[in-house]
Amino acid sequence: MSDKSNEWEELLIKVSKRFNVLADFDFLLFIIGIQERGQGFQKYEKQDKMDMINLARCVLFEQCGYYKQKGVDEEGWPEFEVLKKVEDIAPSEREAMLKKAMIDYLNDKL
């Protein structure tokens, strides 16, 4: 676990320097959502930010085999189907799974 912990800390530092912010779990989800939505950085309302974070969670859970993208809605947002229930996983395990998926995703993109 310490290897993953070190990777997580290194990723937070890397992203913090890249975006000149103090990056945290939610910020990483937000930038993944922006990347997936393809609209780039702009001023987002609170609900838009929450939608970006939710999109990122879906994309990351798809990476883990829990969701599968089934298309896009009329507004161009990806739609996902549930393959396995995320709710069946303990919250701490869910967070660890998302962190690992974020490490893989962002190390590939940055």
Image (cartoon, helix red, strand yellow):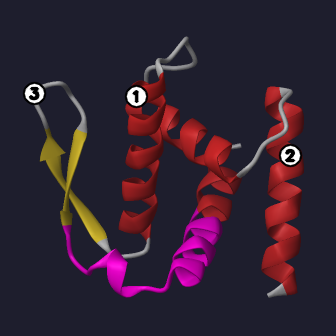
Look at 41% across and 26% down and name the residue there.
48
Mark 3 sits on what residue? 74
**Is label 2 in a helix, a strand or a loop?**
helix
- Tell me the quarter of the picture where residue 85 sits: bottom left
> Which amino acid, mark 2?
Lys
Q: Which badge, 2 or 1, comes first in the chain's sequence?
A: 2
Residue 87 against residue 29 in the figure, above or below: below
In-front residue for pair 54/80: 54
In terms of sequence position, does the residue under pointer 1 or pointer 3 come before the other? 1
Q: Which circle marks residue 14 in the picture?
A: 2
Q: For numbered disc 1, what is the local secondary structure?
A: helix
**Which residue is label 1 attached to?**
47
Which residue is depicted at the point 78% across and 42% down? Answer: 23
Q: Position of residue 3 (x, y in %)?
A: 85, 81
For the magenta stretch, what is the residue range?
A: 82-101
Q: Is residue 34 found inside the magenta-colored segment of the image?
A: no
The answer to whether 66 is drawn above or below residue 40 in the figure is: below
Residue visible at 61% across and 59% down in the picture: 102
Q: Residue furthest top?
A: 43
Image quadrant of residue 37? top left
Report the residue that reaches farthest toward the left: 74
Amino acid marked by disc 3? Glu
* Residue count near mark 2 (Cα–Cα under 10 Å), binned few <14, some 14–19, many ≥20: some
Magenta stretch, main secondary structure class = helix
> Residue 101 appears at what percent x and percent y?
57, 66
Gap between marks 2 and 1 measured at Cα: 27 Å
Which amino acid type is marked by label 1?
Gln
